[in-house]
Image (cartoon, rainbow, N blue to C red):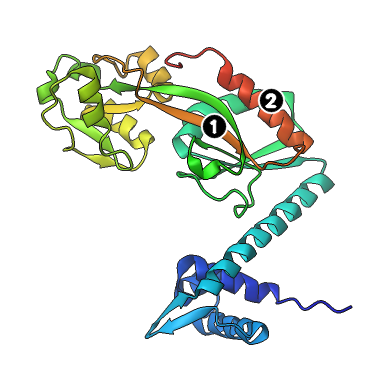
C-alpha cells in the first residue's frame, strides 16, 4: 500500500515558517528563497486540501489548523533527528545524550563536574543545548532538561536536584556601603526579587527596582565582580568567587528566596541505559554537600 506522505522539504518549510511566523525568516534559516518556501507551503496545502497559513497583506499568519499541524510535525521532526543522531552514535560505539540546560547552570555547576562523568562513562557523550526557560521536551529532540521547577513540566517525569538559596553578593570594596546607597543589579526575568528581598530582610533599599538589568545570572555575577553593584544570585553559582575573596556577602541570606532545579525526562516506563546512568550520576552530584544548599 502506497503511503500518502508530504515531502520532508515541505514539512521543514512548514515547521520553520510556523516557528518564525514568516516565510522570509524561514527562507533565511533554510538557505532558500522566500519563493521556494511559499511554493513548498502551497504544495502542502494543495495536498492536504487545507489552508495552513492566512495571507494578510504582506504577512502570513498560521491558521488554527496550521498551528496544530505544525506543532505535531515539529515533534515528529525532533524525534527523527534524535533517532538519527542516536543511530550514528550507536554505530560508532558511543551513546549520545542531548541535554537542554540553563546556560549559567551549565557553565558554573554542571560542566566543572562533567569530567568525572566522562571518566566513569567514556562511552557516553553529553551534548549540552542552551534552554533559558521551560519548553516542550517532546518537540525539542532532547532526551532531558535541567531547568527550573515549573508547571510546564507537569506531563513529564520530574526529579528534584537541589534548592539553591539566593545570596546578595558584591565586590569587597563595596561591602561597607549602606543599603540605602548600594546600587542594585537586576535580572530581567525577575524584576521584583530585590523588593521581596528587602521586605524579608527588613532592609531599606531606596532603589528596589532601579539599576542595570541583565539577561543572565552570569552577567550579573561579572557586573558584581567589576564593582558595579550588588547582585542577587544563586549561591552555587558564586562558590568559587566567595572562597577566593573576589565577592563577598555582607547582607543576610533569606531562606525563603531560592531557586529550585530539576531533571526533566520523558515519562517512559524505562529510560535508555545511557540516560539512566546520567540520571543516577547527576542526582548523586546534586545531593552531595555543597555550600549554600538547602
Q: Residue furthest right?
A: 1
Q: Position of residue 62 (x, y in %)?
A: 48, 74
Residue 19 vs 226, above or below: the answer is below
Q: Residues within 10 Å of mark 1 (few under 14, many from 20)?
A: many
Q: Is residue 32 left or right of residue 225?
A: right
| Of marks 2 and 1, the one in the foreground | 1
Q: In the rendered image, is residue 277 in sight?
A: yes
Cα–Cα gap, marks 2 and 1: 13 Å
Q: Nearer the viewer, residue 277 or 172?
A: 277
Q: In the rendered image, is residue 226 in sight?
A: no
Q: Is residue 277 left or right of residue 287?
A: right
Disc sitting over residue 280 in the figure: 2
Residue 294 vs 22, above or below: the answer is above
Disc sitting over residue 274 in the figure: none
Q: Nearer the viewer, residue 105 or 283?
A: 283
Q: Position of residue 10 (x, y in %)?
A: 64, 76
* Residue occupied by mark 1: 262
Residue 85 vs 186, above or below: the answer is below
Q: Is residue 20 left or right of residue 274?
A: left
Which quadrant of the structure image shows residue 225?
top left
Q: Residues within 10 Å of mark 2 (few under 14, many from 20)?
A: few
Q: Quadrant of the C terminus?
A: top left
Q: Quadrant of the N terminus?
A: bottom right
Tag 2 and tag 1, C-beta contact below 8 Å: no
Q: Position of residue 135 (x, y in %)?
A: 52, 48
**Mark before the other along the chain sequence, 2 or 1:** 1
Q: Residue at x 21, y 30 (%)?
A: 195
The residue tagged with tag 2: helix, strand or loop? helix
Q: Residue at x 60, y 52 (%)?
A: 140
Q: Is residue 290 left or right of residue 219?
A: right
Amino acid at each position: 500500500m502506497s503511503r500518502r506522505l508530504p515531502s520532508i522539504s515541505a514539512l521543514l518549510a512548514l515547521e520553520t515558517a510556523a516557528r518564525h511566523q514568516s516565510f522570509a525568516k524561514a527562507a533565511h534559516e533554510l538557505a532558500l528563497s522566500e519563493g521556494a518556501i511559499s511554493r513548498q507551503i502551497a504544495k502542502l496545502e494543495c495536498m492536504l486540501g487545507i489552508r495552513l497559513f492566512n495571507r494578510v497583506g504582506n504577512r502570513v499568519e498560521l491558521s488554527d489548523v496550521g498551528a496544530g499541524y505544525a506543532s505535531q510535525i515539529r515533534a515528529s521532526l525532533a524525534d527523527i533527528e534524535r533517532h538519527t543522531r542516536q543511530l550514528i552514535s550507536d554505530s560508532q560505539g558511543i551513546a549520545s545524550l542531548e541535554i537542554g540546560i540553563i546556560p549559567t547552570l551549565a557553565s558554573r555547576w554542571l560542566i566543572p563536574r562533567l569530567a568525572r562523568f566522562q571518566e566513569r562513562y567514556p562511552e557516553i557523550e553529553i551534548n549540552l543545548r542552551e534552554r533559558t526557560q521551560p519548553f516542550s521536551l517532546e518537540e525539542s529532540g532532547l532526551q532531558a532538561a535541567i531547568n527550573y521547577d515549573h508547571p510546564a513540566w507537569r506531563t513529564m517525569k520530574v526529579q528534584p536536584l537541589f534548592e539553591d538559596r539566593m545570596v546578595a553578593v558584591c565586590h569587597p570594596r563595596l561591602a561597607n556601603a549602606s543599603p540605602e546607597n548600594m546600587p542594585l543589579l537586576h535580572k530581567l526575568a525577575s524584576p521584583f526579587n530585590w523588593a521581596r528581598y528587602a521586605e524579608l530582610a527588613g532592609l531599606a533599599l531606596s532603589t528596589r527596582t532601579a539599576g542595570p538589568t541583565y539577561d543572565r545570572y552570569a552577567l550579573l555575577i561579572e557586573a558584581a565582580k567589576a564593582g558595579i553593584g550588588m547582585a542577587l544570585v544563586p549561591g552555587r553559582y558564586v562558590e568559587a568567587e566567595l572562597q577566593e575573596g573576589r565577592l563577598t556577602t555582607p547582607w543576610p541570606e533569606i531562606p525563603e528566596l531560592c531557586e529550585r532545579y530539576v531533571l526533566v525526562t520523558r515519562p517512559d516506563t524505562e529510560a535508555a541505559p545511557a540516560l539512566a546512568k546520567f540520571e543516577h550520576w547527576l542526582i548523586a552530584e546534586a545531593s552531595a554537600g555543597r555550600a549554600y544548599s538547602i
